Image (tube, helix red, strand yellow):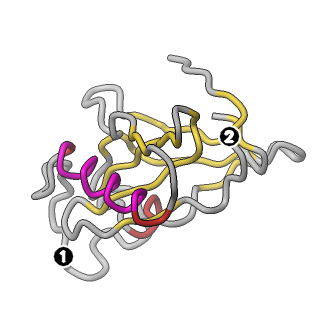
């Protein structure tokens, strides 16, 4: 995805189809960095806190909050923070959380993540305005 401030990419495990991690690419320098936020803090398999707190002994993408529940949590968050008609795209499942794009009044506006254990929402405020998206295999 191309945004005003960066390019965003998801790396997906080939064998499972589960999101491994999220990356940002600086559009001016080409430097690739891990996306901040859920990617680093909630990712129970590839994140920087995996196993540190003793919470996750065996990383799993099976979480108490379902993808459908995550969508509803995201919609409630968006309705409380924005005006207009909010829609969420199908969430990408990661180890410990979901990330999804959202639209306001039919136009892609940004993305947010929902913790698969607590339901906490993390709004991705660092992208800037959405420009375009391209999927590659």
Q: Nearer the viewer, residue 129 or 21?
A: 129
Q: CA distance from mark 1 to mark 2?
A: 35 Å
Q: Locate residue 92, reporting x and y percent.
A: 35, 39
| Label pair 1/2, CB-CB below 8 angstroms | no
Q: Nearer the viewer, residue 67 or 83?
A: 83
Which residue corresponds to the image point at 10% horizontal and 58% vertical from the top-left? 64
Q: Quadrant of residue 19?
A: top left
Range shown magenta: 68-79
In the figure, is residue 134 to the left or right of 81? right
Residue 77 sits above or below residue 137 on the image: below
Q: Secondary structure beneath disc 1?
A: loop
User: From the image, which quarter does the N terminus lie in?
Assistant: top right
> How many neighbours does mark 2 have within 10 angstroms: few (below 14), some (14-19), or many (20 or more)?
some
What is the residue that sits farthest to the right in this orientation? Answer: 28
Q: Locate residue 65, reporting x and y percent.
A: 15, 56
What is the residue that sits farthest to the front in this orientation? Answer: 84
> How many neighbours does mark 1 have within 10 angstroms: few (below 14), some (14-19), or many (20 or more)?
few
Q: Which residue is mark 1?
A: 55
Marks 1 and 2, the one that precedes in the sequence:
1
Q: Locate residue 3, reporting x and y percent.
A: 71, 42
Q: Secondary structure beneath disc 2?
A: strand
Residue 21 sits above or below residue 82 on the image: above
Residue 85 sits above or below residue 51 on the image: above
Tag shown at residue 130: 2
């Amino acid at each position: 995805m191309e945004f005003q401030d960066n390019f965003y990419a998801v790396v997906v495990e080939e064998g499972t189809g589960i999101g491994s991690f999220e990356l940002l690419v600086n559009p001016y320098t080409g430097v690739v960095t891990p996306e901040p936020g859920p990617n680093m803090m909630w990712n129970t398999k590839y994140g920087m806190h995996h196993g540190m707190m003793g919470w996750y002994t065996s990383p799993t993408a099976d979480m108490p909050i379902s993808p459908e529940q995550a969508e509803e949590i995201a919609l409630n968050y968006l309705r409380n923070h924005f005006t207009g008609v909010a829609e969420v795209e199908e969430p990408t499942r990661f180890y410990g959380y979901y990330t999804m794009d959202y639209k306001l009044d039919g136009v892609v506006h940004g993305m947010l993540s929902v913790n698969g254990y607590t339901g906490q929402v993390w709004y991705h405020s660092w992208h800037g305005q959405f420009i375009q998206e391209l999927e590659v295999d």
